[in-house]
Image (cartoon, rainbow, N blue to C red):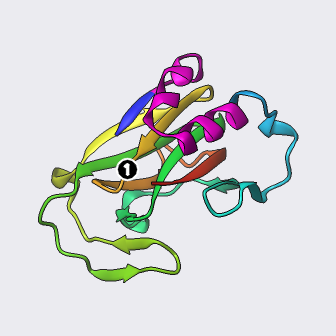
Amino acid sequence: MITSTLSQLQGYKIISPNFEKAIQYILSTDFSALETGKYAIDDDNVFAIVNEYTTKPASECDPESHRDYADIQIMIAGIERFGYAPLTDQRETIPYDPEKDVAFYTLTPEDLSYITLHPGEFIIFFPVDIHQPELFTHQPDLVRKVVIKVAL
């Protein structure tokens, strides 16, 4: 897991050519002007999903992990809290779905560390990371977020 401000994102282009494409797209796109939906950047290698939703209590958000893609999640508007744990020996409660590239887990709050993102900040989750998105901080908040899926 990596998190910082968008002004620091440039330094992560070195991770892979797909990360370089994703970051160039992020830094050259006005996401507030895009409709919600999916946007192709480089076929299935790199694509963007623009979301708007209201954050929820942790009890309504299942921790998840991916195998084929890393997520670069960028906060455009609103505040969102994320749960995080390194993927070690946790057991999947909803088995991995290769078509959706996701497995789900049932973890207690004590099993997770938490971080809050504000507009202009990003977080990157890799397949070795369990993450629990869409959490509210003190109260539900309308969030506009972009998730860039980067094939590894």
Q: Nearer the viewer, residue 136 or 11?
A: 11
Question: Mark 1 belongs to which amino acid?
Answer: Phe
Q: Quadrant of residue 115?
A: top left
Mark 1: give few (<14), some (14-19) or many (20+) Cα within 10 Å: many
Residue at (64%, 39%) from the top-left corner? 21
Where does residue 68 sit, x and y in percent of width and height?
A: 43, 64
Q: Residue 138 falls in which quadrant of the image?
A: top left
- Pick out the residue farthest to the left: 89
| Magenta span of residues | 4-26
Residue at 34 percent of width and 56 percent of height: 127
Nearer-the-camera pick, 121 or 58: 121
Report if residue 20 lies within the magenta region: yes
| Left-right relation of 42 to 93 | right
Location of the N terminus (image quadrant): top left
In this rendering, the answer to whether 41 lies above or below 5 is below
Percent coordinates x, y for residue 79 in the rendering: 56, 37
Q: Is residue 142 left or right of residue 69?
A: right
**Percent of width and height locating residue 126:** 37, 50
- Local secondary structure at mark 1: loop
Q: Main secondary structure of the magenta part?
A: helix
